[in-house]
Image: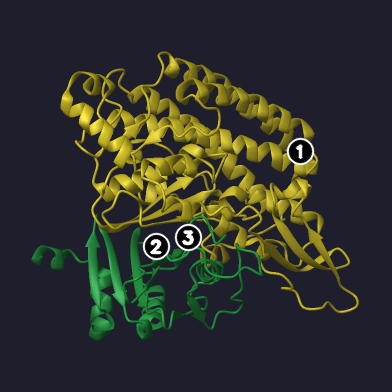
C-alpha cells in the first residue's frame, strides 16, 4: 500500500492537496486510477482538472452510468478523462441514490458531455442538473422507463 | 431521438428534414436543417433509428458470447471492435496474450483499417459526384474481404479475435497472400490519388469546407482522422500503445487545415502507414507458436490438449458452458479504430457475465460535432461534412 501511495498519479496528489475532504476514495485497479468524489465537489474538481496547466485533462472520452441495483447508492456515474499532453487517463466516479439520481452537468466544462449525458439519462435515468437539452437520444420520445436499469428486463416489458 | 428540437422558424427560413432515408447519410441518420436560402442556420442530428440495445444484451451473455455482438456495431471495422473488447476483458482477467497472436492482431486490424478507409473513400467520393473511385475502392476491398474470409471464415462479421488470442490458427499461405495484395496496393492508392488529389472539382468541393478548429475538436472530444485533420496527433496507437504497437515504426498522419480535404489527405496517408505496419508485422510473425494464451480456466485449451487430457477436457467444457469469471472490478480499454477512439468500459461483479459494458463509440462522439462543421455554410456542403466524419450508424446507435 505504501508504494502505491508514492506512485499515486500527480492528478490524485493535486486533487488531494487542493481539497483534502473532496475525495472519498481512490481506487487503483489494473493500472487504472479511479477517484470517487462526493456529488457536490464534482464540478470544482472537473474545472480544476481541466484548467490546471500541468494536468490538462481537456479531453472527456466518455460518461458511463452503472446501476448497482439493489445496492444503495444505486447509481454510479463514471467520467473517463484523458490528458493529451501527459498521455494519462483518469476516471472520476460519483455515486447517487435512487431517491435522488441527480448529478450536476459537466457540459459547461466539456461540451462533448452533452450527448453522453443525454444518453445516460435516456438509458439509465440519471438526471443531469443544468443540462441544456436533457431529452431522449436513442430511444423513441414516447418511451417509458430507462432500459439499461437492472430492474428493466432485457426482453423488455410485454 | 428528440423531436421538435428546433423552434418554429421565422417566416424567411425553411426547415428541411434530411434523412433518415437518404443515400448520403450512410445509414439511418436524420439531420434537421434550418435554412436561410442555401445557408444552414441550424443543424440537429437525430439518431437512434438503429438502436438495438447491444450494451444491454451484453449483460445477458457470457464474455465470449459478447464478441459476435461487437462485430455488429462498427460493421466496417469488426476486427477493431473485437480487439477493443478482447483487450478490455484480458485486462480485467489479467491475461497475457502471446506475441505471435499480438502481431497477427496488429496485422489484421491494420489490414481491416485499410478496408474500412476504402469504403469511406469510395462512398465519400460518390457523395460528391466522383463515381469511378467508388468502383475502384470496392474492387480492392473485395480482394481484402476474400483474404479475411480465408483467415476467419467470414467476410465481414469475423469474430476472429477471442479472449486470450485468436479463434483459429490462420491458414497456410495467408502471409504471402496479404503481402501479394500489399504489393499491388501502392499502385491502387496512386490510382485513387490520380483521380482525386489534384482534381479541380474535388478540390473545390472539399477545400475550405467543413472546417473543424482544433480547440473545437478537443472540446467535442472528436478523435481519429477527423481530429488529426485539424492538427492534433492524438492516436491511441502512439499515446496508449496496446497489442505491441510500440514495437512498430510508423508515422501518425496529420494535417492542419481542418477541412474535408485535409481529412481526405490524412486518411490516404493512414492507408499507406497501415500498409507499412502490415509489412512489418508480416516480417515479425513467427511461423510457429501458440495463437492463444495458455491460462487455466480463462482461455480454452488447445484442441489437442482437450482431446488428450482429462483436465483439458474439463476446462474446455467449463469455459464453453459456464464461461470465464474475471475478478470484480472495472476497466476502460480504448483502441484506435478507423474512426477514432473506441473504448470499452467493462465492469465485472465476479460472475460469468459482464455486469455492465459501455462502448465509447467514436462515430457517436464525432457526429456530435457535425453542427460545428456545417452551420453558416451551404447546404450542398452538408453531404461533404457528413461523409468526412466517416460515421457508421450501427456504432452510433448501438
| Res B391 visible | no
Look at discs 3 and 2 and give the one toward the viewer. Answer: 3
Give the residue pinned by disc 1: B199
Q: Position of residue B283 (x, y in %)?
A: 36, 22
Sequence-earlier tag: 3 or 2: 2
Asked if both marks, 1 and 2, belong to the same chain, the answer given is no
What's the chain of the residue with tag 1?
B
Asked if both marks, 3 and 2, belong to the same chain, the answer given is yes
Look at discs 1 and 2 and give the one toward the viewer. Answer: 2
| Res B105 visible | yes
In the rendered structure, are the residues bearing label 3 and label 2 in contact, judged by CB atoms less than 8 Å apart?
Answer: no
Q: How many marks?
A: 3
Does residue B252 sit above or below B396 in this rendering? above
Residue B202 sits in quarter: top right
Q: Which mark is residue A82?
A: 2
Q: Residue furthest left?
A: A2
The 10 Å Cα crowd at callout 3, few under 14, some 14 to 19, many 20 or more, is few
Q: Which mark is residue A142?
A: none
Give the residue pinned by disc 3: A153
Q: Position of residue A59 (x, y in %)?
A: 45, 65
Amino acid at each position: 500500500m505504501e508504494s502505491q501511495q508514492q506512485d499515486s498519479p500527480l492528478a490524485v496528489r493535486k486533487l488531494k492537496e487542493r481539497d483534502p475532504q473532496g475525495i472519498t476514495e481512490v481506487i487503483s485497479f489494473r493500472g487504472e486510477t479511479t477517484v470517487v468524489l462526493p456529488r457536490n465537489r464534482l464540478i470544482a474538481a472537473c474545472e480544476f482538472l481541466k484548467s490546471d496547466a500541468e494536468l490538462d485533462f481537456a479531453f472527456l472520452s466518455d460518461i458511463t452510468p452503472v446501476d448497482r441495483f439493489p445496492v444503495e447508492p444505486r447509481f454510479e456515474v463514471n467520467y473517463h478523462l484523458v490528458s493529451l499532453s501527459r498521455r494519462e487517463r483518469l476516471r472520476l466516479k460519483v455515486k447517487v441514490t435512487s431517491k435522488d439520481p441527480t448529478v450536476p452537468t459537466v457540459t459547461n466544462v466539456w461540451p462533448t458531455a452533452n450527448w453522453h449525458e443525454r444518453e445516460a439519462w435516456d438509458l439509465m435515468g440519471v438526471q443531469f442538473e443544468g443540462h441544456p437539452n436533457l431529452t431522449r437520444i436513442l430511444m423513441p420520445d414516447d418511451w417509458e422507463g430507462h432500459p439499461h436499469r437492472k430492474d428493466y428486463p432485457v426482453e423488455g416489458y410485454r | 431521438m428528440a423531436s421538435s428540437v428546433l423552434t418554429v422558424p421565422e417566416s424567411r427560413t425553411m426547415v428541411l428534414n434530411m434523412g433518415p432515408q437518404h443515400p448520403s447519410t450512410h445509414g439511418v441518420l436524420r439531420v434537421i436543417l434550418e435554412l436561410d436560402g442555401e445557408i444552414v442556420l441550424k443543424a440537429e442530428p437525430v439518431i437512434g433509428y438503429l438502436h438495438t440495445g447491444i450494451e444491454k444484451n451484453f449483460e445477458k451473455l457470457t464474455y465470449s458470447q459478447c464478441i459476435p455482438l461487437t462485430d455488429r456495431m462498427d460493421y466496417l471495422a469488426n476486427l477493431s471492435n473485437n480487439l477493443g473488447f478482447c483487450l478490455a476483458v484480458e485486462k480485467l482477467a489479467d491475461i497475457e496474450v502471446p506475441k505471435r497472436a499480438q502481431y497477427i492482431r496488429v496485422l489484421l486490424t491494420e489490414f481491416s483499417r485499410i478496408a474500412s478507409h476504402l469504403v469511406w473513400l469510395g462512398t465519400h467520393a460518390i457523395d460528391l459526384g466522383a463515381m469511378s473511385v467508388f468502383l475502384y475502392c470496392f474492387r480492392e476491398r473485395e480482394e481484402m474481404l476474400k483474404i479475411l474470409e480465408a483467415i476467419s471464415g467470414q467476410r465481414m462479421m469475423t469474430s476472429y479475435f477471442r479472449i486470450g488470442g485468436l479463434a483459429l490458427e490462420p491458414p497456410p499461405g495467408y502471409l504471402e497472400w496479404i503481402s501479394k495484395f500489399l504489393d499491388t496496393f501502392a499502385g491502387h492508392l496512386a490510382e485513387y490519388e490520380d483521380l482525386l488529389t489534384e482534381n479541380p472539382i474535388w478540390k473545390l468541393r472539399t477545400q475550405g469546407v467543413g472546417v473543424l478548429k482544433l480547440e473545437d475538436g478537443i472540446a467535442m472530444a472528436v478523435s481519429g482522422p477527423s481530429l488529426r485533420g485539424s492538427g492534433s496527433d492524438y492516436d491511441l496507437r502512439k499515446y496508449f500503445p496496446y497489442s505491441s504497437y510500440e514495437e512498430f515504426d510508423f508515422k501518425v498522419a496529420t494535417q492542419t487545415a481542418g477541412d474535408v480535404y485535409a481529412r481526405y489527405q490524412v486518411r490516404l496517408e493512414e492507408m499507406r502507414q497501415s500498409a507499412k505496419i502490415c509489412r512489418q508485422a508480416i516480417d515479425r510473425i513467427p511461423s510457429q507458436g501458440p495463437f492463444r494464451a495458455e491460462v487455466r480456466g480463462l482461455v480454452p485449451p488447445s484442441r489437442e490438449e482437450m482431446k488428450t487430457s482429462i483436465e483439458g477436457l474439463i476446462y474446455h467444457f467449463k469455459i464453453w458452458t459456464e464461461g470465464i469469471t474475471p475478478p470484480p472490478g472495472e476497466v476502460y480499454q480504448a483502441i484506435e479504430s478507423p474512426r477514432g477512439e473506441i473504448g470499452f468500459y467493462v465492469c465485472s461483479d465476479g460472475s460469468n457475465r459482464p455486469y455492465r459494458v459501455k462502448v465509447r463509440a467514436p462515430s457517436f462522439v464525432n457526429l456530435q460535432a457535425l453542427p460545428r462543421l456545417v452551420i453558416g455554410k451551404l447546404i450542398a456542403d452538408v453531404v461533404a461534412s457528413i461523409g468526412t466524419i466517416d460515421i457508421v450508424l450501427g456504432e452510433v446507435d448501438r
